[in-house]
Image (cartoon, rainbow, N blue to C red):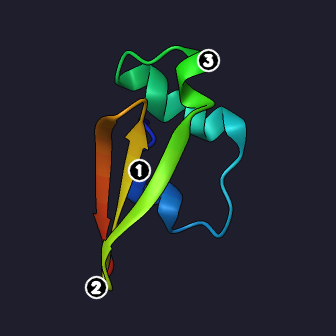
Amino acid sequence: MQLTFTALLKKSKLNDDEYGEIGNQHGCTDQQIQHRVIKPIDDRSRILVIMGVRVGVHRYQ
């Protein structure tokens, strides 16, 4: 089963392997994944950015 950003954000804390798995699905290297950022878009949305590339958006219900 592929991990998705949404599924991971439902957990309280992600580990590096889980971030790595998402990044690798998007063709990111492990070194790039070290530079990950989770940015809030608004009160209900978060976005995962790796090296300036948007790889996922999560909206809270």
Kindly identify the amino acid type of the residue bearing the numbered disc 2: Gln
Q: Quadrant of the C terminus?
A: bottom left
**Whether residue 20 is situated above or below residue 14 in the rendered picture:** above
**Whether residue 8 is situated above or below residue 24 in the rendered picture:** below
Residue 1 shown left or right of residue 11 in the figure: left
Q: Tell me if label 2 and label 1 are in contact, CB under 8 Å.
A: no
Looking at the image, tell me whether mark 3 or mark 2 is earlier in sequence order: 3
Residue 18 shown left or right of residue 43 in the figure: right
Kindly identify the amino acid type of the residue bearing the numbered disc 3: Gln
Judging from the image, what secondary structure is the residue with disc 2 in? loop
Residue drawn at 68 percent across, 33 percent down: 17
- On the image, which quarter does residue 42 sit in? bottom left
Residue drawn at 42 percent across, 29 percent down: 51
User: Residue 39 appears at what percent x and percent y?
Assistant: 41, 61
Judging from the image, what secondary structure is the residue with disc 3 in? helix
The residue where tag 2 is placed is: 61
Residue 5 is tagged as 1
Looking at the image, tell me whether mark 3 or mark 1 is earlier in sequence order: 1
Judging from the image, what secondary structure is the residue with disc 1 in? helix
Q: CA distance from mark 2 to mark 1?
A: 15 Å
User: Residue 45 appears at what percent x and percent y?
Assistant: 30, 73
Q: CA distance from mark 3 to mark 2?
A: 32 Å
Which mark is nearer the camera, 3 or 2? 3
The residue where tag 3 is placed is: 31
Residue 44 is tagged as none
Residue 53 shown left or right of residue 1 in the figure: left
